[in-house]
Image (tube, rainbow, N blue to C red):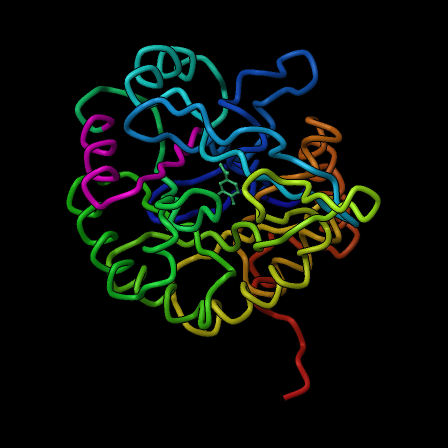
Amino acid sequence: MADLSIKIGHTTFKNPIFVASGTFGYGTENPELVDVSNIGAIVTKSITLNPREGNPPPRIVETPSGMINSIGLANIGVDKYINEMLPVYEEIGSPIIMNIAGSSMEEYIKVLQQMEAVSSNIVGYEINISCPNVKEGGMEFGVDCNMTEKLTKELRKLTDRLLIMKLSPNVTDISAIATSSENGGADAVSAVNTVVGMSIDHKTGKNNIYTTYGGLSGPAIKPVGLACVHKVYNSVKIPIIGIGGIVNSSDVIEYILAGSIAVQVGTANYRDPGISEKILNDLNSYLDEQELDSIDSLIGSVKTYD
Ligand code: DHB
C-alpha cells in the first residue's frame, strides 16, 4: 500500500484528505457517522474574537451542482472554543487546524494570542482572509497584497504552529496574494474559498439569500479551484491545499496534478459526512493500481500544451 503521509512545514499528516472549514462543524458533531481518526486533518469552523449569531435566514440555498451560503461567520467565539473545544480535541484522534476569521488585524492577532497563551494539541491555523459574506470579514485582506503580507507577518511572529492562508478566488490575481502569503512567512496556502454567487427564484422574483450574494461551493466551482491551484503552484514554493468541489478520488487526483499536496473536502460533507474516508480508500486503490508509493510524483505534474 502507498504511503499517503505528507509534510506541510514541520507537520506530518497521515494522509492528504482534510475536511474544510464550515462543513464539518467543530469536528465533534457526527461521531456515529464518521470515524474522524481516518481524516488527514479537520479544519474547524471560523472562530472570531467574540461569539457571532451570523446573518439572518435564508442563508443557504442549493444551486446547480452546488450551493450558496451566507452564514455570516456564526461561531462560539474564541473563549468558548478554548474552554469547550480544546479539551475535546485532546481525545479526538485527528489533527485539528483551527480556522480564524477577523474584521481587523487586531482581531486576528488577539485570537491567535489567546490560542497561543493556552496549551493545546491544535497543529495549526488556517487564516480566513476570504469570507465573502460579512462587511468586514477578512476579504479586504484577501484582495490586497500588502495587507495579506502584513497580516501574515504579524501572525507569523506569534506562532510556530502551521500558518495557512486561505485564499479567495474572487480576486484579479490569486498568484500575487499567494506570493504575499509566502513572503509573509506562511507555511502553506489553501485555495480556494467560495466564489461569490447569487440565486433568484424566478417564480416569486425573490432573491434566495438574505445578504443578496453568498459563497458558491460544490462541484460547480471545481474548474475554478483547479485553475487557481495551478496558477498558485506556478508562483510559490510553499505547499498548496486544494479546495473546491471535491466529491471523489478522481477530483483529488486532479487537484494533486494541478499542484496540491493535500485537499479539503467541503460541501460533499453535507450529503455524506463520511465521504472523506471513502475518498481516501479510493485514492489508496488508485495509487496501488498505478503502482505508486506516494502522491509525490503526481504533484503539479499535469500535462499542459505549452
Ligand atoms: C462564510 C465564510 C466563508 O469563508 C465562506 O467562504 C462562505 C461563507 C460565512 O460564514 O458566511
Q: Position of residue 281 (x, y in %)?
A: 73, 37
* Foreground residue among 127 and 214: 214
Which residue is the extreme one toward the right? 203
Q: Position of residue 192 (x, y in %)?
A: 53, 54
At 65% from the left edge and 71% from the top edge, which residue is drawn? 302
Total numbered badges shown on the rendered structure: 0
Left or right for 18, reference 115: right
At 30% from the left edge and 53% from the top edge, which residue is drawn? 186
Quadrant location of the C terminus in the rendered image:
bottom right
At 23% from the left edge and 37% from the top edge, which residue is drawn? 107
- Is 209 rendered above or below residue 33? below
- Based on the displayed image, in which of its 4 quarters is residue 33 positioned? top right
Does the magenta run of residues contain 78?
Answer: no
Q: Position of residue 248 (x, y in %)?
A: 75, 45
* Foreground residue among 40 and 64: 64
* Foreground residue among 246 and 282: 246
Magenta range is 96-115
Does the magenta run of residues contain 102?
Answer: yes
Q: Position of residue 210 (x, y in %)?
A: 58, 38
- Is 69 rendered above or below residue 250? above
